[in-house]
Amino acid sequence: MSILNTAAPVAANRGSATWRLTKAEIKLCIREKTGPLWGVGFPLILLVILGNVPALGEPVEANGDLTYFDLYVPVIILFNLAILALTALPTILAGYRENGVLRRMRTTPIGPARVLAAQLVANLAIALVAVVLFLTVARLGFGVRLPQNLAGFAVGWLLAAAALLSIGLLITALAPGRGPATAIGTVLFFPMMFFAGLWVPIAQMPPLLQNISPYTPLGAGMQVFQEASYQGHFPSAQPLLTLAGYAIICSVAAVRWFRW
Amino acid sequence: MPPVIEVRNLHKRYGNNVAVDDVSLTVQEGEIFGILGPNGAGKTTTVECIEGLRVPDRGEIKVLGLDPHRDHAELTRRLGVQLQAGQIQERLEVAEALELYSSFYPNPADWRGLMDGLGLAGKAKTRYAKLSGGQKQRLSIALALVGSPQVAILDELTTGLDPQARRDTWDLIEDVRSRGVTIVLVTHFMEEAERLCDRVALIDAGRVVMVDTPAGLAERARIEQRIQFRPSRQLDDGLLTSLPEVSSVTRRGETVIVSGNSDALNAVTAVLARNQIVAERLRVEQASLEDAFVELTGKRPDATS
């Protein structure tokens, strides 16, 4: 037998190993189905259904050209980010810890930290595909204008993604196992989506909730998207800083308390 | 030649629970070194310290001249590890896993050859979660070897394998060793240790009881030989009990059972020959490693650890 023969020299430097790992984790995220089904498929269907509700085609203000449906497009984008970051990511990573995948990785040259990074990149990649898909369907299917300030929209999206993924990492760090991680993520998902205006548009919330909303991650995200999409200017500092604050505080806390 | 693995006075506790009290051992290049012991003896903690997964509270460890904790990155390139409870990503397919893990190493082995050698070729497209226990085990062995390691530490090598797969795995390990790979085997299968190991460390309650060859260990446990036969004609027990090498003679039907030290067989056959008695259905039971294990630790080797 010659089973330990060295393979034909492949480019096995660490850069390519990291890239292979990232590709593998993207594939695994897609096989996991939570992200693609609940994070992309479900909001896409929601978008199409809402686009066909005549009442949502009405302008928000008399004679304005902004419709209620227009306001739902950023909600759908945030819905996608929240599912991926709060549910899909913590479930997979807490499962990796529970099943000893991270431990197994620690005995290889690649180490467990890069598995974590690969998962972040994988979810970010799925989210990026999703946001392009949502904007395209909204534009081509229902005539929703693309964000007027594209750069501002992109910066806002990146900060919202960073904030939510950091919260997802913090959930992973603190949850004792896969089950609790999924539970915490799901429980956080609903109130956070509420503040983005999924059920009641922010403008119609009671004043107290309207005041809280901009300080929640999804409320701030909503504000950023509205400013960049429909008011056409670069998002204002306050929601951007709120998102950055969540990203920094939660990722520092996640690093501090993460158990491999 | 400096030893490949050197452990000196290793001590590790979890809270008030002492997992490893005081373990010292050395593993030479190219040998298969077995670590044997009852449940909770500290076998797995010992190898996890050697792998750099745990930091010892006291003591010194060198693997290939490296400190497993400080030089962890370098060690991972040269050490292959099979963990007792280390899984891989559930939805990864067998071939994908081998290809991915082989890409982590500077000079990987041919993963396809490993996959064939471990009988996993038919499962190349099967996801890890769908594999049987034995298939997972074989994949985990393949992953431990996929980096062409200089040293491989295999914890519970053949647990969960059927007898045929176990023998195939033993052949594989002997083949790996013949390529100069040093192997540390944590096991509770005495048969496995007897078949594969050059030397065995018997660990009990966090301490090394004895290090020797499997045969030497059995010998040092001072376990007697048992000789069974059916004499061709009437035999007076006194002929046998008078031999200094024999300690007892019992009968079961027509069968005579003689216990004695390692020279008893020669003495008994000489007496029988002098008296023109033929020993029919002669059977000799050597003291096994399992007997030694029970004798030295007072415990049965259990199925898990």
Image (tube, rainbow, N blue to C red):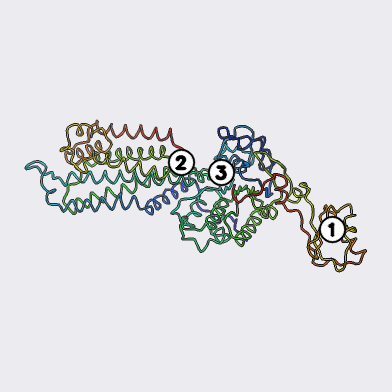
Task: Using the image as rendered, state which of residue A244 and residue B9 is in the foreground.
Answer: B9
Give the amino acid type for the residue marked by disc 2 in the picture: Ala
Mark positioned earlier in the residue sequence (1 or 3):
3
Q: Callout 1: residue from which chain?
A: B
| Residue tagged 2 | A113
Task: Using the image as rendered, state which of residue A37 and residue A232 is in the foreground.
Answer: A37
| Residue tagged 1 | B265
Task: Using the image as rendered, state which of residue B221 and residue A56 is in the foreground.
Answer: B221
Give the amino acid type for the residue marked by disc 3 in the picture: Thr
Q: Secondary structure at mark 3?
A: helix
Q: Secondary structure at mark 2?
A: helix
Q: Callout 3: residue from which chain?
A: B
Q: CA distance from mark 2 to mark 1?
A: 62 Å
Residue at 31%, 45% (x, y): give it.
A83
Residue B246 lies, in percent from the top left, at 85, 54
Q: Residues within 10 Å of mark 2 (few under 14, many from 20)?
A: few
Q: Secondary structure at mark 1?
A: helix
Question: Which quadrant: the N terminus of chain A?
Answer: bottom right
Q: Residues within 10 Å of mark 3 (few under 14, many from 20)?
A: many
Residue A221 lies, in percent from the top left, at 25, 38
Give the amino acid type for the residue marked by disc 1 in the picture: Leu
Mark 2–mark 3 CB contact (< 8 Å) = no
Badges 1 and 3, same chain: yes
Q: Callout 2: residue from which chain?
A: A
Residue B54 lies, in percent from the top left, at 56, 38
Residue at 51%, 53% (x, y): give it.
A10
Residue A11 lies, in percent from the top left, at 50, 51
Left or right of residue A50, residue B70 in this image: right
Left or right of residue A40, residue A118 in this image: right
Camera-nearest label, 1 or 3: 1
| Residue tagged 3 | B76
The residue sitting at the left extreme is A63
